Image: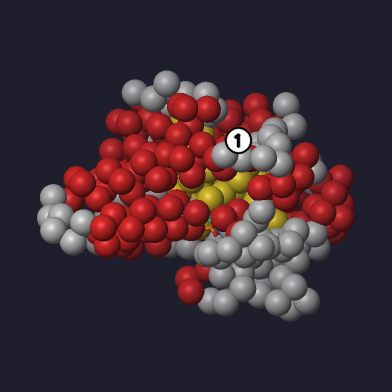
Amino acid sequence: PLVTTGELVTRAAATHSAVAAFNIITLEHVEAVLAGAESVGAPVVLQVSENAVKFRYGRLLPLARAAVAAAERAAVPVGLHLDHVQSDDLLRQAPDAGFSSVMYDAARLPYDENLAATRAAADWAHAQGLWVEAELGRIGGKNGESPLDAHAPGARTDPGEARAFVAESGVDALAVAIGSSHAMTTRTAALDHTLLKHLADTLDVPLVLHGSSGVPDGELAKAVAGGITKINVGTALNIAMTDAIREFLAAHPEAVDSRTYLSVGREAMVRAVAGIIRGLTGPTAT
Ligand code: G3H
Ligand code: ZN
């Protein structure tokens, strides 16, 4: 069934676990995420990024409607989240499109501007009943930029600054920069667990890990144990889907029916989703 992201994250926080949130681009992503979550009996979040909306010719509703319809029929609780929103126009479409939560992303701005923009977005979103996530510190690799150097200014979230940011913006959850980076195609990110502990001790809102595709399994489980409550995964599904389709088409150069390769790609994503969710609770994923 469709539930709110807020209740999934609150429940995860209460049990010191995390809910996995997967970026969806196509209907196959939607189906694969739900099937993968159902196969391990775990709640899950379907998230649509602003970039995915751009890919869908700028239209949010077609994919959102499909996600809502699929979530309503799922055997596990499913939240629907609008991810990395920079556009106020897109933000304002969230409630009617069925989203219970948004990640408002002004992390590219200097601190004061990030705070002002995030507070305004959170005020509006809360009035609509939405749960709001924001980002402080810069998680690199967005929109094709290269991963930030660990020592680059702003590449890590400062605990004291984060405490003030959360209090003044009123957000419900915070995406923290602790060493992960977006769009990594190898699972080689090194997380700063000392900083994570400091952040978890300092902040009283759930913490979100972005760029989780690049984080090794054992490290993800350790981050969850250390206070991460929402795990955002995108690239790992694209890798699974694209690798499977590439292999299928190489072996079947005569194939023309899109269902033949899309089903192979979808099944690869189902396995990836199940493996990642299992990996959140322990070092071994299958
Ligand atoms: O918000 C989405 C996530 O941060 C996805 O990052 O594509 O590197 O897994 P990823
Ligand atoms: Zn992200």
Tell me the quarter of the picture where residue 33 sits: top left
- Tell me the colour scheme of the image: secondary structure
Q: In the rendering, at what x and y percent does residue 59 appear? A: 27, 55
Quadrant in which the C terminus is drawn: top right
Looking at the image, the residue that sits furthest to the front is 251
- 91 vs 64, left or right, is right
Q: Which residue is mark 1?
A: 278
Residue 7 visible: yes
User: At x 72% / y 47%, what residue is drawn?
Assistant: 218
> Is residue 82 rendered to the left or right of residue 134?
left
Residue at image point 41% right, 33% down: 34
Most foreground residue, 119 or 248: 248
Which residue is more in the foreground, 77 or 7? 77
Give the residue displayed 34% in from the left and 37% down from the top: 31
The quarter holding residue 138 reads bottom right
Residue at 66%, 63% in the rendered image: 188
Whether residue 56 is visible? no
> What is the three-letter code of the residue carrying label 1?
Arg
The location of residue 215, given as percent across then percent down, is: 65, 56
- Cβ(mark 1) to ligand 1 < 8 Å? no
Q: Secondary structure beneath disc 1? A: helix
Q: Give the answer, above or below, for where 73 lies relative to 33.
A: above
Tell me how many marks there are.
1
Image coords of residue 155 (percent x, y): 72, 70
Q: Residues within 10 Å of mark 1 (few under 14, many from 20)?
A: some
Instruction: Tell me the quarter of the image containing the N terminus.
Output: top left
On the image, the x and y values in percent for residue 239 come to 44, 58
